[in-house]
Image: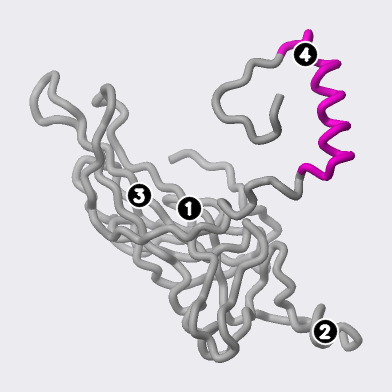
């Protein structure tokens, strides 16, 4: 079984010995060095749209609604005062949020429409990197905390001024009502939409346009970024 083979590969208990031998060979040959890591650093284009997508097959009308997704997007910042800034870990790409509006047909047995839009959530952070030449936010694999890097011998508490939340989208977070519900037509009204990460911050974005609105903090609450809720 080739390390980077494409397509669907069926493996059963009958392949266990073969797979074990292949794992050992891959380890001995340091095959991870030829893994296509570069694909994880390919930047995504922003489409504020909405763009109508081509749908293959059918989507039932009862599936209508909005699907939100977020994750790393931009991985390179050009023209900083210190040259090009490159993200060194997949998880540390600057946040990029996606929205898929699934719109049912107004007539029976009509086709369902899917509209797509996306927006970058860290434009202020990227602008700061261009001005300073380095990243001053908490990250997953990027050594950005000056108290750990630059000032390691003088460990202190570092409170970052820049954020890039790119892990989980949380609609209708209890206790964080932003005012009147957003009118999204055929969708359930959303009172708020937040992006969380593995720190205590929450980033507020507009449910309709995905525009970043600001940050709040849960620093005094003992909760995780994976909140259980009913929506």
Label 1: which secondary element: strand
Mark found first going from the N terminus, 2 or 4: 4
Mark found first going from the N terminus, 3 or 1: 1
Q: Position of residue 11 (x, y in %)?
A: 70, 16
Front residue (pair 161, 149):
149
Which residue is at the far left? 107
Front residue (pair 52, 183):
52
Q: Which residue does the numbered mark 3 point to in the structure image?
A: 99
**Mark 1 or mark 4, whichever is nearer to me:** 4
Q: Is residue 165 depicted above or below 29 in this figure? A: below
Q: Which quadrant does the N terminus fall into?
A: top right
Which residue is at the far front? 29
The crowding category of the residue bearing disc 3, from other C-alpha atoms within 10 Å (few below 14, some 14 to 19, many at least 20), is many
Q: What residue lies at 78% left-to-right and 42% top-to-bottom?
A: 31
**Mark 2 or mark 3, whichever is nearer to me:** 3
Q: Which quadrant does the C terminus fall into?
A: top left
Q: Position of residue 228 (x, y in %)?
A: 58, 42
Mark found first going from the N terminus, 1 or 4: 4
Q: Which residue does the numbered mark 2 point to in the structure image?
A: 156
Q: Image check: 209 left or right of 70?
A: left
For marks 1 and 2, give the CA distance. Answer: 32 Å
Q: Is residue 179 depicted above or below 61 in this figure? A: below
For marks 2 and 3, give the CA distance. Answer: 39 Å
Mark found first going from the N terminus, 1 or 2: 1
Q: Which residue does the numbered mark 4 point to in the structure image?
A: 15
> Predominant secondary structure in magenta?
helix
Q: Position of residue 8 (x, y in %)?
A: 57, 22
The reply to whether dot 1 and dot 2 touch (C-beta < 8 Å) is no
Q: Image check: 83 left or right of 230?
A: right
Q: Which residue does the numbered mark 1 point to in the structure image?
A: 70
**Mark 4 or mark 3, whichever is nearer to me:** 4
């Amino acid at each position: 079984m080739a390390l980077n083979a494409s397509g669907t590969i069926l493996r059963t208990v009958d392949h266990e010995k073969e797979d074990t031998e292949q794992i050992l060979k891959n380890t001995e040959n340091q095959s991870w060095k030829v893994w296509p890591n570069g694909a994880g650093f390919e930047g995504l284009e922003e489409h504020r749209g909405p763009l109508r997508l081509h749908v293959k097959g059918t989507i039932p009308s009862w599936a209508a609604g909005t699907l939100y997704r977020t994750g790393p997007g931009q991985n390179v910042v050009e023209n900083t005062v210190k040259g090009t800034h490159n993200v060194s870990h997949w998880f540390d790409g600057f946040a990029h949020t996606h929205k898929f509006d699934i719109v049912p047909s107004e007539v029976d047995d009509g086709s369902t429409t899917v509209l797509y839009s996306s927006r970058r959530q860290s434009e202020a952070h990227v602008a700061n990197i261009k001005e300073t030449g380095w990243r001053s936010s908490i990250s997953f694999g990027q050594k950005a905390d000056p108290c750990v890097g630059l000032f390691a011998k003088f460990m202190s508490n570092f409170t970052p001024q820049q954020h890039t939340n790119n892990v989980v989208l949380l609609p209708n977070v209890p206790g964080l009502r932003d005012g009147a519900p957003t009118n999204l037509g055929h969708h359930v009204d959303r009172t708020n939409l937040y992006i969380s990460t593995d720190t205590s911050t929450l980033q507020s974005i507009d449910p309709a346009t995905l525009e970043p609105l600001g940050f709040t903090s849960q620093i005094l609450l003992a909760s995780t970024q994976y909140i259980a809720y009913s929506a």
